[in-house]
Image: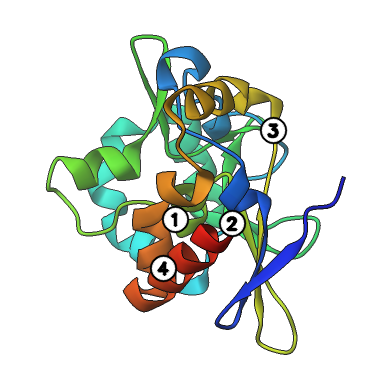
């Protein structure tokens, strides 16, 4: 089933970003989004520079295998579609995945939350389960990505009645600005 498309400014988004609920449940998923899949997290050239700038800070939190991958190919690579993504270990784990109490965490975000860096993590990670695509005409498209590893997040979101766009308010504001987000809220009220 294809969701209707809504436009807010220069951004096209699937209506399920407004109508579906989502709230990460790390206790249940154990951070599976950092280790599942066949490619790393999408990153921009600017983000690669920022990650390289904080690499010394997060290096000790990275596994020896992740350090070897970064030494060999850097913090990012072009995937089979030609998109820049974070490097991965063993065909799945993001190189910035670190573990504690049987759960995955992001070494970049850990350093940010500890006040050691001003860079949190790639915007694509912060925006998940929204995936962004830029079209040749300059419009940006946002789609809600449904993934089995996030089943608990969908259940928790429904239980707490938190729509995807509200759960992701901070990264959406970081990406598109307060004014754009206010426009999104107006559209959501109309639905």
Which is nearer the eye, 94 or 6? 6
Which is nearer the eye, 87 or 180? 180
Residue shown at 66% from the left, 82% from the top = 139
Label 2, label 1: how far apart the Cα atoms are:
7 Å
Residue 54 image offset from top left, x and y in percent: 27, 55
Label 2, label 3: how far apart the Cα atoms are:
16 Å
Q: Secondary structure at mark 2?
A: loop
Discs 3, 1 touching: Cβ within 8 Å: no
**Label 1 packing within 10 angstroms: few (<14), some (14-19), many (20+):** many
Tag nearer the camera, 3 or 1: 3
**Label 2 packing within 10 angstroms: few (<14), some (14-19), many (20+):** many
Which numbered disc flags the more N-terminal residue, 4 or 2? 2
Q: Secondary structure at mark 3?
A: loop
Which numbered disc flags the more N-terminal residue, 3 or 1? 1
Label 3, label 1: how far apart the Cα atoms are:
19 Å
Above or below, 106 against 31 in this view is below
**Label 4 packing within 10 angstroms: few (<14), some (14-19), many (20+):** many
Residue highlighted by disc 1: 122
Tag nearer the camera, 4 or 2: 4
**Image quarter of residue 76:** bottom right
Residue 129 image offset from top left, x and y in percent: 58, 44
Residue shown at 43% from the left, 61% from the top = 172
Residue highlighted by disc 4: 181
Residue highlighted by disc 3: 147
Discs 4, 2 touching: Cβ within 8 Å: no
Tag nearer the camera, 2 or 3: 3
Residue highlighted by disc 2: 42
Q: Would residue 55 appear left or right of 93 to someone viewing this image?
A: left
Above or below, 174 against 31 in this view is below
Q: Secondary structure at mark 4?
A: helix
């Amino acid at each position: 089933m294809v969701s209707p498309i809504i436009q807010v400014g220069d951004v096209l988004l699937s209506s399920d970003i407004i109508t579906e609920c989502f709230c990460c449940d790390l206790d249940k998923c154990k951070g599976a989004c950092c280790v599942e899949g066949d490619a790393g997290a999408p990153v921009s050239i600017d983000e690669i520079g920022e990650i390289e700038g904080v690499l010394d800070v997060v290096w000790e939190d990275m596994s020896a295998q992740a350090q070897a991958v970064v030494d060999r190919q850097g913090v990012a690579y072009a995937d089979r579609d030609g998109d820049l993504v974070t490097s991965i270990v063993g065909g799945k784990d993001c190189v910035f995945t670190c573990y504690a109490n049987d759960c995955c965490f992001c070494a970049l975000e850990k350093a940010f939350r500890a006040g050691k860096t001003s860079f949190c993590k790639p915007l694509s990670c912060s925006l998940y389960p929204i995936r962004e695509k830029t079209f040749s005409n300059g419009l940006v498209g946002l789609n809600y990505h449904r993934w089995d590893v996030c089943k608990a997040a969908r259940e928790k979101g429904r239980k707490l009645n938190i729509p995807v766009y509200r759960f992701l308010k901070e990264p959406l504001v970081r990406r598109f600005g307060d004014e754009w987000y206010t426009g999104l809220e107006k559209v959501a009220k109309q639905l």
